[in-house]
């Protein structure tokens, strides 16, 4: 009897591990997605106070991670943009677009456009 119980438990454990591994592989199949924003800020104080400070918690709450946030750009080939460069990583394009299309984000972009011009796009990264 113990032999059959051991075999049954082994089969159940194997199925559980197989399901977990399959889910992990499916998650890896979706590449990360990035928001790239070139923001030409015309009123820095209001931009930071009324837009950036409110956008940051919306980004992080939906799983976004800042990769680049307005750092100094150095010329390599061609001329670097004079605008503020922001790059944000999301786990995948579905999560990125859900964040972007949320009412809070679209409403906040309307506020931000009073203090600058935005050129924002999404791009998929490389799958692992």
Image (tube, grey):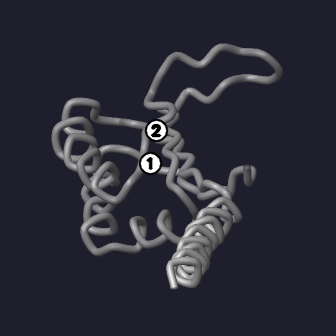
Q: Secondary structure at mark 1?
A: strand
Which of the two discs, 1 and 2, labels the residue nearer the N terminus?
2
Q: Secondary structure at mark 2?
A: strand
The residues tagged by marks 1 and 2 sit, at their Cα atoms, a distance apart of 5 Å
Q: Which residue is mark 2?
A: 40
Q: Decide: is 92 above or below 128.
A: below
Q: Nearer the viewer, residue 17 or 33?
A: 17
Residue depicted at 56% across the width and 27% down the height: 82
Disc sitting over residue 25 in the figure: none
Mark 2 packing: few (<14 Cα in 10 Å), some, or many (20+)? some
Q: Decide: is 105 above or below 114.
A: below
Tell whether label 2 touches label 1 (CB within 8 Å): yes
- In this rendering, position of residue 80 left or right of residue 118: right
Q: Position of residue 39 (x, y in %)?
A: 46, 41
- In this rendering, position of residue 57 left or right of residue 36: left
Residue depicted at 80% across the width and 23% down the height: 78
Q: Position of residue 91 (x, y in %)?
A: 53, 56
Q: Decide: is 44 above or below 6.
A: above
């Amino acid at each position: 009897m113990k032999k059959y119980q051991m075999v049954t438990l082994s089969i159940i454990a194997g199925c559980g591990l197989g399901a977990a591994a399959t889910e992990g592989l499916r998650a890896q199949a979706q590449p990360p997605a990035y928001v790239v924003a070139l923001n030409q800020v015309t009123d820095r104080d209001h931009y930071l106070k009324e837009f950036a400070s409110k956008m940051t918690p919306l980004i992080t709450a939906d799983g976004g991670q800042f990769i680049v946030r307005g750092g100094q750009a150095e010329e390599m080939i061609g001329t670097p943009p004079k605008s503020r460069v922001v790059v944000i990583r999301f786990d995948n394009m579905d999560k990125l677009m859900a964040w972007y299309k949320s009412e809070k984000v679209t409403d906040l972009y309307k506020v931000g456009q009073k203090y600058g011009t935005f050129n924002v796009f999404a791009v998929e990264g490389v799958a692992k």
